[in-house]
Image: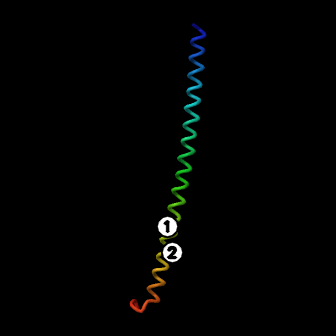
C-alpha cells in the first residue's frame, strides 16, 4: 500500500513538472509573439511616416497644389 502511495506521489510530481515546463514554453512563445508584433507595428508606423513625407514632398512639387 505504501508503495502505491509513493508511486502515485511520484507520478503526480512528474505530471506537475511536465505541466510547469509546458507553461514556461508557452510563455516563451507568447513573449516571442509579442516582440514580433511590436516589431511589425514599428515597421508599419515607420512606413506610414515615410508615406506621409513622400506625399508632402509630392504636394510641394506638384503644380496642382501651388
Quadrant including the C terminus: bottom left
Secondary structure, mark 1, is: helix
Q: Residues within 10 Å of mark 1 (few under 14, many from 20)?
A: few
* 4 shown above or below 20: above
Q: What residue is pinned by disc 1?
A: 45
- Where does residue 13 sit, x and y in percent of width and height? 58, 24
Q: What residue is pinned by disc 2?
A: 50
Residue 62 disc label: none
Q: Residues within 10 Å of mark 2 (few under 14, many from 20)?
A: few
- Where does residue 52 sit, x and y in percent of width and height? 46, 76
- Where does residue 3 sit, x and y in percent of width and height? 60, 10
- Quarter of image, res 2: top right
The residue lying at 49 percent from left, 80 percent from top is: 54
Q: Residue furthest left?
A: 64
Q: Are marks 1 and 2 in contact (CB under 8 Å)?
A: no
The residue lying at 57 percent from left, 33 percent from top is: 20
* 50 shown above or below 11: below
Amino acid at each position: 500500500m505504501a508503495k502505491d502511495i509513493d508511486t502515485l506521489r511520484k507520478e503526480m510530481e512528474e505530471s506537475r513538472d511536465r505541466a510547469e515546463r509546458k507553461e514556461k514554453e508557452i510563455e516563451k512563445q507568447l513573449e516571442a509573439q509579442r516582440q514580433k508584433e511590436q516589431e511589425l507595428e514599428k515597421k508599419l508606423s515607420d512606413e506610414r511616416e515615410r508615406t506621409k513625407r513622400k506625399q508632402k514632398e509630392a504636394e510641394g512639387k506638384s503644380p496642382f497644389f501651388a
